[in-house]
Image (spheres, rainbow, N blue to C red):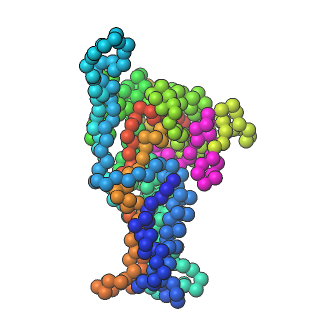
Amino acid sequence: MVMDAFLQLRTALDSTTEVTGGDSRIGVGAVFIQKEIDRMVRETINVATDFRQLVPRKTMRQLAYIWNLKTSKGSTIKTKFYGDGGTGTPYPSEFLQLFAPAKSMRSDYEVTGITIAASSSYFNALASEAKDAIESHGVTEEQAMILGDDTGSESTGITLNGQVGVTDSWKGLKQLLSSAATIANGGFADVSAAYGSTRSATVGDREYKLNVQTVKTANNATNPISVDNMNEAITKSNIQGGKHANRMFLCSERRLDQISDLIAPQGRYVVGASAVELDGGMSVLAWKKYKIIGSRFMAFNGVTSVNGTSVVFQDADNSTLFLDMNHISFYNVAGVDVRHVPIVGADASQRSDVEGGYFKTYGIFVVDKFNTHVVIWNLSAP
């Protein structure tokens, strides 16, 4: 996947001229520091996350991403057999216009001058702090992609901020992948809004297209995941038109262990299980050719029911997602995507004896179509 975080800095980074702001080592200036940070972004951000790098990153040049979700191909049939010279009236498709405003996020770092000077012979303190900021940036972004703006607290130490989601972030999969249909009709009876429109349980409504597909282990009790659940998720997505899309399962790390024991016991694949290779040479477990990705943050994406009539959304490990990645994207604004902004004390009015900078991203995480995604729920915690 192409990462265009520093495209507008290439001229400066490729320069051979020293600039003000280098550290205390002789012959090392800010240009070389920037090159080191550029390299670290490529090498650090993707090894610290699991789901983020699988989301296509695209560019927009406005403050919000606006799109039309097709809800109907017209009020009557578009295609028919007709006699010689037959005429008819065209029936245009119907759409629901949705919008998602971009958010800005940044990750700061700084090191005092005395620390840089005292450690320069054996330790690059500035590079170390920059690396931590990059890693935090990517991990927090993945947390927001999956758990959105859920401000509930968590005490397991999985997240960096002690919260389930990220305050003031975009909506994540936890909020977006829901359904207004009743449990009896394969939904969650959830009429929450998505991108400015409220979901509807009525098939004739345009807002009905905001609903995802669901697979439950049982009406009124949690159960372990089974290959039947996974097969049903694939089939439901197929029926909705996702058969030839780029799709994948997303679950927690412990659920991934459970699925591994299920489809590859004692290291031997059962029929349907295999391994697939991702970009970069990493291999992951797959079921019927669809890769299975584990992310620590899926441990807080829970949907359960104990009565068969209502569901509880909770911060627990009770679901696995089957995602149509053709309809999940991250849109950055004008290429501002993990862009580095150095702070090197060049401004005469800046009196603090520190060096550092920050990484900033302007963008929005978007699920632009819903009915080809599937939530497998009422799973017992692994």
Which image quadrant: the C terminus? top right
Front position in the image: 297 or 40: 40
Horizontal and vertical percent for residue 288?
Answer: 61, 34
Residue 299 is covered by the magenta coloring: yes
Give the answer, above or below, for where 76 lies relative to 164.
above
26, above or below 204, in the image? below
**To which quarter of the image does residue 381 belong?**
top right
Looking at the image, residue 1 sits to the left or right of residue 65; the answer is right
* For residue 21, above or below residue 68: below
Q: Residue furthest front?
A: 85
- Outermost left residue: 89
Residue sitting nearer the eye, 300 or 148: 148
**Is residue 50 found inside the magenta-colored segment of the image?**
no
For residue 14, say whether it is visible. Answer: yes
| Residue drawn at (51%, 49%) of the image | 54
Figure check: 371 above or below 176: above
In the foreground, 238 or 225: 238
Q: Is residue 315 visible?
A: no
In the image, the segment drawn in magenta is 277-301
Q: Residue furthest bottom?
A: 26
